[in-house]
Image (cartoon, rainbow, N blue to C red):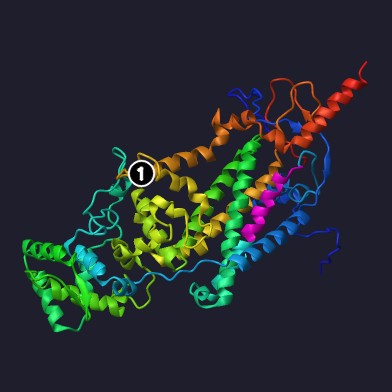
């Protein structure tokens, strides 16, 4: 009978001979790019000191509230909020979460624009942020179409002309309540959530973009080696 | 960090571009409790949203139904219904994706709606008038519909044109439309039956597109309602019309989809304001602008705007102030 001697502290940890496994490669790649200290750092560069940085976390917070209140509405079905004061209140929470989400996100976006936050191999972070904003516009739009009230009727009958002109109306019928509801509560939130996760992980991987360098001669804490150097990262490993 | 390599495997060092590259930070790191910041933000936003929900609630104006429309404006309903029957309504002449009776919007040769064709087929006469009337258990109405269907297209057009002119002066009383006398064939019987059907609410159900028990597609009733003026008159009074930046507004004084301001703005300016291809033109502009925004980091000139504008000096003012202080102390300490 074999006896476990307890020589390995973590029996699920990979051995060198397992390194060729897809699982091991994925784990090693993930932990290499995003070790715990970088995923949840307890220190940030000294230049991370402005109110503009707050709007990123405010956007994520508002998104979580949008999803949470949307889930409560989903529990009772799309007609609930029209006939129940509790439902109306939850719908109001959902609406104002969306308004707050966009308010924070737009400030975050323009803040990052004026910081040129794509510098230093952070271009994908910028692109995922912009795409997340666009998909969020679609998610909110389909939400307005799914309200089953006068606003839904008016917005859908007005918006159909724009959508139809692009040819998208052949597949995306804004007058079809069932289709719009499915897009609103399944497809688009899934994409927004996925993009938000990727965006945040990219921020953690690449770190917060450093300020534009001070004029030559000043000590700004950045290693600059003359006029020619490869693009480098500003985050601590 | 991997460095770009040339075709012969040599390291290629590209010129430092301040709008693309950054230098590695070797300065101070300060304590920053990320989780605590997140929890505080979540609680703060939850409180803010709750206060807004309690104070302002959310709008929920009742939808317009064919029943409410035909009871509120029976003559207006009949005026729209006859255009559905004679094929002159907005839906009847829309074009793709509903039918081939209209011209799809285009910019030069670019006309995606035309290329994709009809995917949500709508025959306004059959779907909005004849089909629903054929569900009625009324012999007189069925006979009128049968007579209309069996008549030549020229005869149908003669009746409907005369009726369309007459119904513009229609009044409504005792459950019937009153129009000047004339040769309208079976059309008055059909229209009176349709108005009665609409006023009872039966037409709302008959217009639902589903061929099964459950349905969630409101394409037909919405197109029919939107062809009339009842819906748009309410929208106008609620500052929702297209020339009132209506797409981004909602009923009441709620902020609506304020993030659509740029999209809505293009409809307010020439040439889109009066163009018959305005929708496609606005979408084309928005797609180009969106592509530009997403690809800012890759576009020389565009990606330099933040450095030229200099708003970053305000954002990182503490950082630059510290640099200035370091500079001056270094100068003062010098020989």
Q: Quadrant of the C terminus of chain B?
A: top right
Give whichever of B323, A117 is nearer the camera.
B323
Q: Is A12 placed above or below B279 here?
A: below
Q: Is B115 placed above or below B200 here?
A: above
Give whichever of B233, A3 is nearer the camera.
B233
Q: Does residue A70 appear anywhere in the picture? A: no
User: Residue at horizontal 44%, vertical 51%?
Assistant: B245
Relative to A20, B103 lies left or right: left
User: Residue at horizontal 69%, vertical 21%?
Assistant: A228
Q: Position of residue B92 (x, y in %)?
A: 23, 59
* Quarter holding residue B121: bottom left
Highlighted magenta segment, given as a residue range:
A49-64
Q: Position of residue A187 (x, y in %)?
A: 50, 60
- Looking at the image, the residue that sits furthest to the top is B335
Q: Which residue is mark 1?
A: B273
Would you say the magenta stretch is mainly helix, strand or loop? helix
């Amino acid at each position: 009978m074999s006896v476990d001697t307890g020589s390995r502290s973590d029996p699920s940890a990979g051995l060198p001979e397992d390194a060729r496994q897809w699982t091991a490669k994925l784990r090693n790649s993930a932990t290499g790019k995003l070790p715990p200290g970088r995923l949840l750092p307890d220190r940030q560069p000294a230049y991370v000191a402005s109110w503009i940085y707050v709007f990123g976390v405010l956007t994520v917070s508002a998104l979580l509230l949008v999803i949470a209140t949307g889930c409560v509405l989903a529990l009772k079905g799309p007609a609930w909020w029209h006939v129940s004061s509790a439902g109306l209140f939850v719908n109001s929470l959902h609406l104002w979460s969306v308004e707050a989400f966009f308010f924070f996100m737009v400030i975050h976006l323009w803040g990052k624009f004026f910081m040129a936050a794509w510098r230093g191999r952070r271009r994908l972070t910028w692109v995922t942020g912009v795409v997340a904003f666009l998909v969020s516009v679609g998610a909110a739009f389909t939400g307005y179409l799914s309200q089953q009230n006068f606003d839904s009727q008016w917005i859908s009958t007005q918006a159909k002309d724009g959508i139809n002109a692009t040819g998208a109306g052949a597949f995306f019928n804004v007058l079809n309540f069932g289709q719009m509801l499915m897009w609103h509560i399944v497809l688009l939130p899934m994409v927004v959530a996925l993009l938000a996760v990727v965006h945040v992980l990219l921020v953690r991987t690449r770190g917060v973009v450093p300020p534009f360098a001070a004029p030559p001669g000043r000590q700004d804490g950045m290693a600059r080696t003359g006029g020619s150097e490869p693009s480098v990262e500003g985050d601590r490993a | 960090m991997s460095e770009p390599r040339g075709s012969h495997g040599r390291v290629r060092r590209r010129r430092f571009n301040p709008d693309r590259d950054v230098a590695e930070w070797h300065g101070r790191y300060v304590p920053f409790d990320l989780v605590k910041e997140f929890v505080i933000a979540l609680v703060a936003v939850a409180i803010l949203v709750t206060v807004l929900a309690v104070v302002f609630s959310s709008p929920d104006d009742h939808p317009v139904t064919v029943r409410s429309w035909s009871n509120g404006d029976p003559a207006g309903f009949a005026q729209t219904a006859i255009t559905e029957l004679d094929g002159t309504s907005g839906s009847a002449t829309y074009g793709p994706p509903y039918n081939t009776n209209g011209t799809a919007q285009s910019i030069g040769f670019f006309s995606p709606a035309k290329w994709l064709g009809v995917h949500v087929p709508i025959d306004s006469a059959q779907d909005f008038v004849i089909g629903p009337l054929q569900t009625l258990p009324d012999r007189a109405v069925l006979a009128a519909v049968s007579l209309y269907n069996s008549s030549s297209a020229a005869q149908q057009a003669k009746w409907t044109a005369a009726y369309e002119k007459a119904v513009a002066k229609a009044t409504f009383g005792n459950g019937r439309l009153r129009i000047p006398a004339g040769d309208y064939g079976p059309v008055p019987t059909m229209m009176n039956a349709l108005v009665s059907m609409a006023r009872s609410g039966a037409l709302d159900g008959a217009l639902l597109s589903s061929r099964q028990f459950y349905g969630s597609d409101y394409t037909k009733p919405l197109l029919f309602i939107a062809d009339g003026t009842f819906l748009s008159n309410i929208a106008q009074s609620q500052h929702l019309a297209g020339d009132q930046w209506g797409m981004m507004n909602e009923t009441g004084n709620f902020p609506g989809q304020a993030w659509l301001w740029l999209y809505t703005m293009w409809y307010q300016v020439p040439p889109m304001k009066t163009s018959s291809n305005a929708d496609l033109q606005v979408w084309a502009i928005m797609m180009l602008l969106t592509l530009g925004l997403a690809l800012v980091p890759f576009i020389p000139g565009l990606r330099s705007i933040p450095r030229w504008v200099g708003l970053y000096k305000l954002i990182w003012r503490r950082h630059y102030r510290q640099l200035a202080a370091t500079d001056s102390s270094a100068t003062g300490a010098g020989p």
